[in-house]
Image (tube, rainbow, N blue to C red):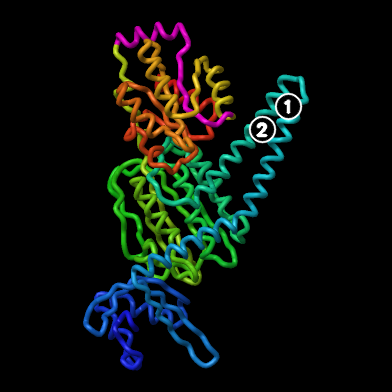
Amino acid sequence: MKKLEATREKLIGKNIFEIISPNSHLNKKSLFKSIQLGEIETVSFKIELIDFSGNIIPFQATLNRLDTNTSNSTILLCLKPSELKQMTQIQFNQEKLESIGRLAGGIAHDFNNILTALLGNITLALEENDLEFIKATLKDAEKSIHRAQNLTTQLLTFATGGQPIKSKVDLTPIITETAIFSLRGSKSRCTLDFDHNLWPVVVDPNQISQVISNLVMNADQAMPDGGEIFIKFYNREFNNQVLKPFGNLNRILIPPGKYIEIIIRDEGTGIPEKIQTNIFEPYFSTKKSRYGLGLAAVYSIIKNHNGYIGFHTSEDPNNSYSEFLVYLPVQEEPPLLKKHLKTSKKELKKDNKKAETKQSILILEDDKAIQRILKKLLQHLHYETVFTENGEDTIQLYKEAFNNNHKFDLVILDLTIPGGLGGKEVIQDLRFFDPDIRAIVASGYSNDPIMANPSKYGFIDVLKKPFSLNQLREIITKII
């Protein structure tokens, strides 16, 4: 009442639409009617109210149905933007914790299974003398490590924000593993249908995993008693512009080109037509205690990947469903810094001479265990290595080697060094000193903007932890 400069007496007996701005009338009456008829139990939306001085004030509103033994009532709760921001942050944090808590038991169970297989294989290999048996056993241990890596990728599903860290990937394992993971503990099950020669795409695998997870969870929530979720993904090439559904009344225009089409369909009750234009809004939801951030995040991620998302739905009792369609463009992998990859004839001769001796790599890494394994991996690849544990020593060693005509062929810089200069600060100093330096940034913090756009910060490429021998070999050989 204070927000509208009104007293209790002024408000009693008034029609609610007398204080709702005409701009907000459009579809709000139908929402009130749906609540009163019991078609939906609760709904959130943006609204403008008129105070008793004639000023229009924006609010975030939640409309709820209240049933008692004697009557049915409708409750309208309105929050100002500043209050909404605070409430939304609290709600968002609670929703995150609920989601993580719901999966924590399954994750702990899976990690313990992985560690059991990993520890068992390693201890068995230490007891054996048969080389072939040892290789086979370590191969099984490697599979366990990849399973653990996949689990950490799934945990990143619950992290938000950040620009996509794109790489060329096969979506098949990302979609299938995420879908299965997202339905742990659910009554629903999924059926998969896909092209077995799916085109590779250049995307952020963690963010696309988040898209799949949110859409699958949304489908699961649409079927409280469980049901079938159908997931299809195919290669699609459009020679002309095509129209795809965006709700039952609207369409989205998709330009010609190659795409991966992802379809996720549930057997729920469908999305009411009156709210179809709102489902991707950040604070719109018809679910109790939810602000509907899942679909908003999906929409944002797909747009950041230059993709398209649409949906189609039916409330027909004999054939109700909701179907989301995602189109991710198939494109070439982003090029590395061109000036570092162009090699003149004179440089080729110099490189041929260097090939007779081992190439050298300077590495900034403060973790002793990672130092040891990096040294073994790089020695296996026939590179000489020099390690430093802080940024200052890295800068000094590089400059000394450069001035003594023993320039390092490559520098690998850990992004974060606790209490000291990390990769971001070191590369600024070194690239100012030597504009032609070849440097890679390494980190397990995949959501850092440097990992998404390394060239902007002076790096040629990124090395995401954890990495395998083949991944390390591939990234180095395409740079030096």
What is the x, y in percent for residue 347?
Answer: 32, 11
Give the extent of the magenta segment: 345-368
Q: Are marks 2 and 1 in contact (CB under 8 Å)?
A: yes
The image shows residue 294, relative to residue 436, as above or below, that is below
Snapshot quadrant of residue 99: bottom right
Residue at horizontal 33%, vertical 77%?
28
What is the x, y in percent for residue 250?
Answer: 31, 62
Is residue 202 shown to the viewer in this render?
no
What is the x, y in percent for residue 94?
Answer: 51, 63
Which element carries disc 2, helix, strand or loop? helix
What is the x, y in percent for residue 207?
Answer: 44, 47
The image shows residue 282, relative to residue 118, as above or below, that is below
In magenta stretch: residue 352? yes
Residue at horizontal 29%, vertical 80%?
20
Q: CA distance from mark 2 to mark 1?
A: 10 Å
Q: Which mark is residue 125?
A: 1
In magenta stretch: residue 438? no
